[in-house]
Image (cartoon, rainbow, N blue to C red):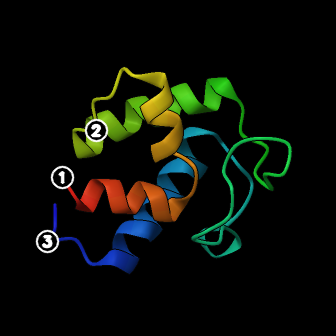
Amino acid sequence: MSNFDSNELKNELKQLIIDECEKECEVEDISDDEILFGSDANLELDSLDALQISLALNKRYALNTTDSKKLRKIMVSINSLAHHIQSK
């Protein structure tokens, strides 16, 4: 997936999260390095959101990970998601 422009990929990931989790925000409202899950997360994503996002990532980017620990590491931030997708 290295043919992706990094900023374009990050914006696509942000839009995917907004769409899948039905968040009322814009792509610009999500920073690349902000934490996506947990008590410190601005988006207030929960485990159901994580499932929806992982299914959408699998469909869009063939990101098929069933290991929950690995998935948690991948889905820490937009930067970590983009890095993982680009390194495939």
Callout 3, which amino acid? Asn
Point 57% across, 57% down: residue: 77
Q: Residues within 10 Å of mark 1 (few under 14, many from 20)?
A: few
Question: Which of marks 2 and 1 precedes in the sequence?
Answer: 2
Residue at the disc numbered 3: 3
Question: Which of marks 1 and 3 precedes in the sequence?
Answer: 3
Q: Nearer the viewer, residue 8 or 37?
A: 37
Point 36% across, 20% down: residue: 66
Q: CA distance from mark 3 to mark 1?
A: 11 Å
Rendering quarter of residue 83? bottom left
Give the image location of residue 1, x and y in percent: 16, 60
Give the image location of residue 10, x and y in percent: 43, 68
Give the image location of residue 51, x and y in percent: 52, 25
Residue at the disc numbered 2: 63
Q: Which of the labelled discs sits on residue 88, or is there none?
A: 1
Residues under numbered marks 1 and 2 in contact, where contact means CB atoms less than 8 Å apart: yes
Q: Nearer the viewer, residue 57 or 74?
A: 74
Rendering quarter of residue 45? top right
Question: Which of marks 2 and 3 precedes in the sequence?
Answer: 3
Point 72% across, 61% down: residue: 25
Q: Residues within 10 Å of mark 3 (few under 14, many from 20)?
A: few
Assign a secondary structure to mark 3.
loop
Callout 1, which amino acid? Lys
Q: Residues within 10 Å of mark 2 (few under 14, many from 20)?
A: some
Task: Left or right? Give the position of 31 relative to 80.
Answer: right
Task: Left or right? Give the position of 70 relative to 26.
Answer: left
Of badges 3 and 1, nearer the viewer stands 1
